[in-house]
Image (spheres, rainbow, N blue to C red):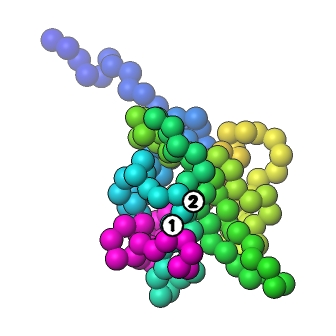
Amino acid sequence: MIADGSIALPCPTQPGSFTALMHLYESNFVRLHWLLDDVAALPDRLCSRVRADLPLHLEVLERSPYTTTLHLTYFFEDGGRQVADPDLTVRVYHDAGLAEAMACRRQHLHHALRAFQTAAGDELSRRWARNSMLSKWLEYCYDQGHRFHGDALLAAGAC
């Protein structure tokens, strides 16, 4: 007879750990696909415009067989010039089903995004903060109605 009580179960994932970060990358991949169908087939520049939110801009920065690197942002007017914020660079790993926020603006303009800034130091903490922000922002964009397919699809110049 096998006793289940003698089997050691793995510890639950701790927020901020490397394992949790990989789960967050998986979650970001799913959320990104809420907004777009096929990353590999995207045109170079797109814009999603909805009534309740700023236009969401997407630019494909790099394409390779296993990854696509995207730039996602809003553009705000600041002193007569356009400023990108949150200004995220996202790498999509097609074969692994992951989406990683690789870089973002150092100093966010919007007060709600400032909570995701981290000081110099621990790389894991910086990655956790960037990717948590991406996760929340993708969910927000989806809730606002942003899509990069169907009726919401516009060429970047139309925004």
Question: Mark 2 = which residue?
Answer: 59
First in residue order: circle 2 vs circle 1: 1
> Amino acid type of disc 2?
Glu
Q: Is residue 33 left or right of residue 64?
A: left
Which image quarter: residue 8? Answer: top left
- Give the quarter of the figure containing the C terminus: bottom right
Rendering coords of residue 86 (x, y %): 67, 65
Rendering coords of residue 154 (x, y %): 46, 74
Rendering coords of residue 50 (x, y %): 46, 82
Inspect this view and state whether residue 13 appears.
no
Count of number-bearing discs? 2
Labelled pair 2, 1 in contact (Cβ < 8 Å): yes
Question: Mark 1 = which residue?
Answer: 46
Q: Is residue 66 shown above or below 115? A: above
Label 1: element kind: strand
Q: Is residue 4 magenta?
A: no
Q: Callout 1: 10 Å neighbours few (<14), some, many (20+)? A: many
Q: Is residue 142 magenta?
A: yes
Taking the spot 46% from the left edge, 35% from the top edge, the residue there is: 66
Considering every residue shown, the one lying at the far bottom of the view is 51
Inspect this view and state whether residue 63 appears.
yes
Disc 2/disc 1 C-alpha distance (Å): 6 Å
The stretch of residues the image draws in magenta is: 138-159
Q: Is residue 60 left or right of residue 110?
A: left
Q: Is residue 18 shown above or below 108? A: above
